[in-house]
Image (cartoon, rainbow, N blue to C red):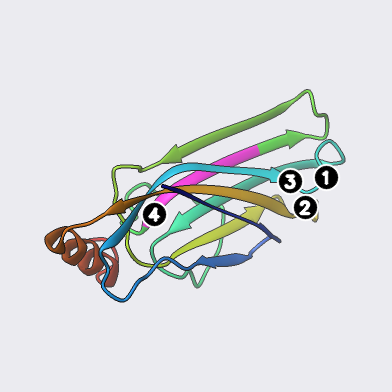
Amino acid sequence: MIKSFRGQLADGGQDTIRLSTNNGLTGYRIKKFQVIDDEPGEYEVEIVAKLYTTEQGTINNTINFADPGLLGVVFYANQGNQAIVSSEVVIFDSVAINQDIFVTASETPGSGAKINYYLELEQIKLDLNEATVATLKDMRGRE
């Protein structure tokens, strides 16, 4: 089963995607993560949107694949002309998660752009051992 989520964030914004269950036996894998600015073609914008396993205190456009809490990232650029749009998506889809995840957005200063995000998660059944491992990784910050 595929579950989808969507929302809009301003620069420095963060949304919580509620996934946790009482028994932790329902897991998810990220299948799709996309973003687009709120007024394509109106102004020049660069956006970095990221998915994390933990709530972020500081939201920026720095991408660090060594961060154990990072699940996926999208870099989106629109040069103010709809004919020149680029997007790069990296998803660590082999990771099974069973706790809440967090979407963050950071955009080029000065444009005032908001981002729209779309997220698809594949729902999977976890056995007791998989659920325990996924929960412990979330609790320990994905070490």
Q: Describe residue 42's horizontal placement relative to residue 58 as left or right.
A: right
Q: Position of residue 32 (x, y in %)?
A: 49, 41
> Is the Cβ of the residue at disc 2 closer than 8 Å to that at disc 3?
yes
105 in the magenta segment = no
Which residue corresponds to mark 1?
39
- CA–CA distance in space, label 4 to label 1: 28 Å
Q: Position of residue 21 (x, y in %)?
A: 35, 71
- CA–CA distance in space, label 4 to label 2: 23 Å
Q: Position of residue 116 (x, y in %)?
A: 68, 51
Which residue corresponds to mark 4?
70
Q: At 25% from the left edge and 64% from the top edge, which residue is drawn?
A: 25
Q: Nearer the viewer, residue 94 or 47?
A: 94
Q: Nearer the viewer, mark 2 or mark 1?
A: 1
Q: Which amino acid does the dot numbered 3 rest on?
A: Asp
Q: Which amino acid does the dot numbered 1 rest on?
A: Glu
Which residue corresponds to mark 3?
37
> Which tag, 4 or 2, sits closer to the chain's start?
4
Q: Residues within 10 Å of mark 1 (few under 14, many from 20)?
A: few
Q: Which amino acid does the dot numbered 2 rest on?
A: Ala
